[in-house]
Amino acid sequence: MDTREKNLANTQKQEASQAKVEKQTSSVIQDVDSMRKQLTNKNSDYVFRLEKALMDAGKSEAEATKIANDLLDEIITAQKQGIPASNLYKKSPILKAEEILHPVIKPKKPKYWMRAVDSGLLYFVVFTAMISIMALTAGAKNQYNSQYGLLTLVAIAAILGTLMTYYTDVLVAGGKAKFGKIALLTIAMVAVLFVVITIFSSKAFQIINPVLPAWANLVLAALVYGARYLFRKKYNITTSVLNPKVDKE
């Protein structure tokens, strides 16, 4: 095949491809025209005012028409059920145009490990502060409590953070909790905490489980609280195990 034949073949392919696109475009236009004819006067007026609002906001006529065309299918589906576009979107055409042009992006739900870490930090702050205040109010003799060394406090916070986040997600927020599951998880959590406290309170762990004075624990709790604030801000965490947000979707 010489160059002339190749060029001719390529030209024929391009013409065939262009004809196919034009046919598809024509079909789409016919479908859109057909759909617009199905609109009631009320819905037709809604679409007209929506297009006008889009153009007033800076969209070209072609862009506004395309955006409105993309909504025709759901408008007609609702129309068949007796629901006009104004009730379907619960917005005026101007507000609907604003929503289309400036959609509200729903924040992503933080991952489980993020919420578990956040919960663990919270429990560390609460538990450490509580132990410190109790020690300070009990007098000089109880400034130290061998049961609650630094490693013990970290372990307790990690366990509570992990299990309580799971508890909140699956058993509470999901609305599918059963008494047996709640009881089983509670017993398991108490048992794990008891074992951890018992093990870390033994003499074998005293070297790596230092017991800090109450004032030092309070300072540490304040620092961890600040770290938690920064952690929540970084990962956009707005809920907690003490204030869960139930997903209604």
Image (cartoon, grey):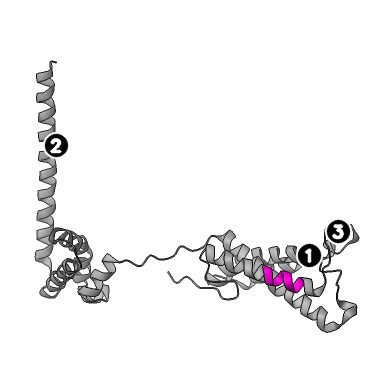
Identify the residue at image location x=51%, y=73%. Answer: 245
**What stretch of residues is rendered in magenta?**
217-223
**Circle 3 residue:** 205
Marks 3 and 2, how far apart at CA? 77 Å
Identify the residue at image location x=16%, y=73%. Answer: 46
Is residue 164 among the parts visible in the rendering? Answer: no
Horizontal and vertical percent position of residue 205: 86, 58
Q: In which quadrant of the rendered view does residue 104 lie?
A: bottom left
The residue most toward the top is 2
User: Is disc 1 placed on a helix, strand or loop?
Assistant: helix
| Circles 1 and 3: CB atoms closer than 8 Å | no
Dot 3 or dot 2, earlier in sequence? 2
| Circles 1 and 2: CB atoms closer than 8 Å | no
Dot 1 or dot 2, earlier in sequence? 2
**How many C-alpha atoms fall within 10 Å of the one at disc 3: few (<14), some, or many (≥20)?**
some
Dot 1 or dot 3, earlier in sequence? 1
Task: Identify the mark at residue 150; answer none if there is no mark.
Answer: 1
Quadrant the C terminus occupies? bottom left
Amino acid identity at mark 3: Phe
Amino acid identity at mark 2: Ser
Q: In which quadrant of the rendered view does residue 239 lie?
A: bottom right
**How many C-alpha atoms fall within 10 Å of the one at disc 1: few (<14), some, or many (≥20)?**
some
